[in-house]
Image: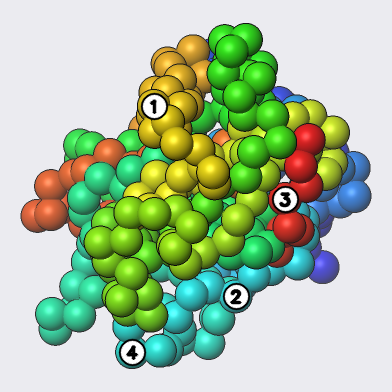
Amino acid sequence: MQAATSAIVGVHPIDAGLGAEIRGVDLSKPLDRRTGAAILDAWHRHSALIIRNQSLTDPQLIAFSRLFGELEMAPPNKSGSHWIEGYPELACISNITVNGEPVGSLGNGEAIWHTDMSFMAEPPAASLLYSLEIPRRGGATHLANMYKAYETLPGDLKRRVENRVAVHDATYTSAGEVRKKFAAFVGTTDPERAPGARHPLVRVHPATGRKALYLGRRSGASGILGETDSQLWDALWAHCGNPALTWAHEWAVGDLLIWDNRCTMHYREAFDDAERRMMHRTQTKGDAPVAA
Ligand code: OGA
Ligand code: MN
């Protein structure tokens, strides 16, 4: 039998708005309970984790991902099949094409600030992104701490987000592509008419009990229900880009980045399409956001 990874795991906070590095684990082997508990505890404290120098097969990535909860199936590709044959849980994030067909989603462009799949009624909790190939430059993933975003809102904005609901327009992906199913909604500007979930603008994290600002996505007709002053939405987004709330992760092959969609947002820098970037991703099921 393979030896389980020992319980000695190092948690090293990143010098940024959020995040910690976990050292001393080999995720290709089953984890003992104490190690798993330590990783989960660090995830709840730091909202995002980086675990470097891993060498994982797809089944090993899937097995480790289950530490964070039941897995959500990945959205299918354009032809309705799984991105990675035999593994419906895996999404492929890549700009690589084979015979003119993309092998993954998001291409090489910028993926604007968002929280994964917030247009769903029950958006995923954890996202785990594992790097197999990376470009020489660009393609960094930035994360924002949405607890701090809420806590540092100026008093007037904090009052104005109380008990408000935002519409998370499902029309566009974070790479700006139109989701085929929602093509009829292109050009919609009224949040009331947009397809996609309605969620509280301030949510309570089910595990930590902390309040987080939940903006989700800005594309299409996303916005605050019943709000006539569009400056409020703009001011909230401007506030979240504050460097004091963020962390930019520069990738190396073998990195596993894990973020909590309930209290973070992320964006991805563009990179040269002549370069190759290939990530495999899992997500865990989440609950309907609960209002603060
Ligand atoms: C994602 C995503 C960013 C990246 O997988 O949800 O936004 O860095 N990826 O590829
Ligand atoms: Mn994303």
Res. 262 in view: no
Q: Position of residue 235 (x, y in %)?
A: 42, 23
Q: Mark 2 near mark 3, Cβ–Cβ under 8 Å? A: no
Q: Amino acid at mark 4?
A: Ser
Q: CA distance from mark 2 to mark 1?
A: 37 Å
User: Gap in Å between the C-alphas at discs 4 and 2?
Assistant: 16 Å
**Which residue is farthest right?**
33
**Distance from Cα at disc 2 to Cα at disc 3:** 19 Å
Q: Secondary structure at mark 2?
A: loop
Which mark, residue 73?
Answer: 2
The amino acid type, in three-letter code, at marker 1 is Gln
Which residue is at a point 62% across and 10% down the rendered structure image? 155
Instruction: Return the residue at label 3.
Output: 289
Residue extending furthest top? 155
Decide which of 163, 140 is in the foreground and name it. Answer: 163
User: Could you tell me residue 81's position as x and y percent?
Assistant: 42, 89
* Mark 4 beta carbon near ligand 1 (under 8 Å): no
x, y percent for residue 150: 63, 23
For mark 1, what is the residue? 231
Marks 4/1: CA–CA distance: 40 Å
